[in-house]
Amino acid sequence: MTDKTPKQAGFRMPAEWAPHKRTWMMWPCRREVWEDMDETRRAYAAVAHAVRRFEPVSMLVRPEDRAGAADLLGADVELLESPIDDSWARDAGPCFLVNAAGERAGVSFRFNAWGGKYHPYDGDDAAAEAILEHAGARVFRSDLVAEGGGIAVDGEGTILTTESCFPNANRNPGWSRAGIERELIEMLGGEKVIWLPGDEWETETDGHVDGIAAFLAPGLVLIEGAVPRRHPMHAVNRANIRALAGRTDAVGRPIRLVEIPAADEAEGDDERFCRSYVNSYLCNGALIMPEYGVRADGEAREIFQEHLPGREIVAVPIAAIAPGGGGIHCITQQEPAGG
């Protein structure tokens, strides 16, 4: 180990569409989050099986939950015992990195349960390093409180994040925006950070970017679309679209925006209910998207099919996941293939 940052050591975070070695997930266990834990676990198993069609899946699970998880997941999903507190692998897990030689590493950011919204969270704070140790990947530690759902990268130096999240006083009160930007660039091997306003009204994650915008390809960003002026998300969506309109990425490429609707008709009384199609997951040869049983499902599928030629679009019902405040992207974390 040296004092070099990942960027100084030649590592970078690859794009989500780069080849994966496997996907990591975390088995649901925080009962206060879920309306029906049994239904949620079955929904997690459905997502795991959808991803498993295309690449291996490894699942962190508490020792006391292992037997039940094995019954639902079967032998084709690897189980790794860990004293986790919750079930959001995107946020508590590491951001994996690769270098030119194909070696893998990962960043372990500090994790405080989205600004101390849940307790305890020490098990989840340790999850990133548990995953990296199992993967045999080098560990880079950061003092920044950050979650994987708070960033999106194109693998070519561009990082998207939001003003409403990491600079929030509930995470990094001693950090300036410039300091956060420098840390993200050094930890993720980036060149340029583009700040979106985010969503200050979203109280679970404080406006993670993975519910707002995501790279589909170099220079191509999927973003929650404009809605009628009377819609409660009108101002939020317009502000995020304006923040990206006319921008260029780290290599000078103009960024093209593809707007996608939210699943506004989806039924869900919990204010945390996630209706975002942006919150989908690119795995080897496929995109796993949420299905709500509403008209917008078909429109979202068509958008993905148009802009992701050659990938199979797989829809998985998430009625038992969305009330927790996240979607399919939130519960998955890719490990790149490396060398």
Image: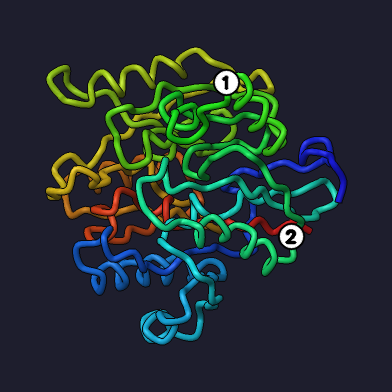
Asked if residue 312 can be seen in this view, the reply is no
Above or below — where is 65 with respect to 59? below
**Location of mark 1 (residue):** 176
Element type at mark 2: loop
Q: Secondary structure at mark 1?
A: loop
300, 156: nearer the viewer:
156
Residue 326 sits above or below residue 7 on the image = below
Q: Residues within 10 Å of mark 1 (few under 14, many from 20)?
A: few
Colour theme? rainbow
Q: Earlier in the sequence, mark 2 or mark 1?
A: 2
Image location (x, y in percent) of residue 206: 37, 34
Residue 1 in the image: state x and y as whole percent. Answer: 86, 51
Amino acid type assigned to the residue bearing label 2 in the image: Ala
Please determine whether, in this image, residue 257 is positioned above or below residue 208.
above
Check whether the beta carbons of the residues at disc 2 and disc 1 lie within 8 A of each other: no
> On the picture, is 37 further left or further right than 189?
left
Q: Residues within 10 Å of mark 2 (few under 14, many from 20)?
A: some
The quadrant of the image that shows the C terminus is bottom right
- Horizontal and vertical percent position of residue 288: 41, 56
Disc 1 marks which amino acid? Ser
Name above or below for residue 276 compared with residue 289: above
Foreground residue among 311 and 26: 26
Q: To which quarter of the image does residue 134 belong?
A: bottom right
| Residue 228 visible at all | yes
Q: Residue at x 49, y 26 (%)?
A: 167
Identify the disc placed on residue 137.
Answer: 2
Kindly identify the residue that appears in the image at 70 percent across and 26 percent down: 191
